[in-house]
Image (tube, rainbow, N blue to C red):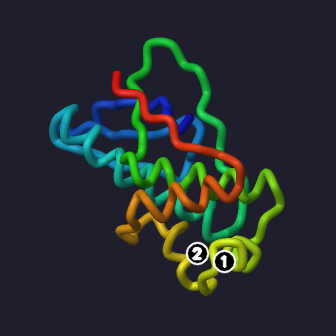
Amino acid sequence: MFDYPVILTPDDGAILVTFPDIPEAITFGETEQEALNHAVDALETALSFYVNARQDLPMASISKGLKRVQPRVIECVKLALYSEMLKQGVRKAELARRLNCHTPQVDRLLDLTHASRLEQLEKALNILGRRIDLVVG
């Protein structure tokens, strides 16, 4: 769902990483592996801009031959929660009411930099009629 293609470009001894679907995400590394590791952070940071601005998340395009980068697992769950809230038109205050908690707790569930517990995210998604399916590939 959040598996974005990246373009790796040699740049003065480093490797520049850009995302065709997310122009805000740009990073680099000295090696390809380092560049891809940094790309995860750049991707999560850029996607947090969309969440903070209450905008739809960019769809990941299908690009053959390009490496792909995904946010970390907990961040993917947070993004799925955010996407489902947008899809259903559920605001933070409404989700807080359904969870029987305060709005700042929902803010933390959606904050990609906050270390939320998977159980909390699973409960929020369940309240929205969704569940988490984990696939290890």
* Distance (Cα) linking label 2 and label 1: 6 Å
Q: Give the residue number, with chain letter if any, for mark 2.
A: 106
The amino acid pointed to by label 1 is: Ala
Out of 78 and 122, give the one closest to the viewer.
Answer: 122
Badge 2: residue crowd in 10 Å (few <14, some 14–19, many ≥20): many
| Residue positioned most to the right | 89
Out of 129 and 104, give the one closest to the viewer.
Answer: 129
Out of 8 and 52, give the one closest to the viewer.
Answer: 52
The amino acid pointed to by label 2 is: Val
Rendered residue at 71%/49% (across/down): 129
- Left-right relation of 31 to 67: left
Rendered residue at 61%/86% (across/down): 102
Q: Earlier in the sequence, mark 2 or mark 1?
A: 1
Expressed as whole percent of the image width and height from the top left, the position of residue 90 reads 78, 65
Residue 60's disc number: none
Q: Give the residue number, with chain letter if any, for mark 1.
A: 96
Q: Quadrant of residue 96?
A: bottom right
Element class at badge 2:
helix
Expressed as whole percent of the image width and height from the top left, the position of residue 17 reads 37, 39
Q: Quadrant of the N terminus?
A: top right
Expressed as whole percent of the image width and height from the top left, the position of residue 137 reads 34, 21
- CB atoms of marks 2 and 1 within 8 Å: yes
Element class at badge 1:
helix
Rendered residue at 25%/43% (across/down): 37
Q: Is residue 9 above or below residue 34?
A: above
Q: Is residue 104 above or below residue 110?
A: below
- Left-right relation of 112 to 39: right
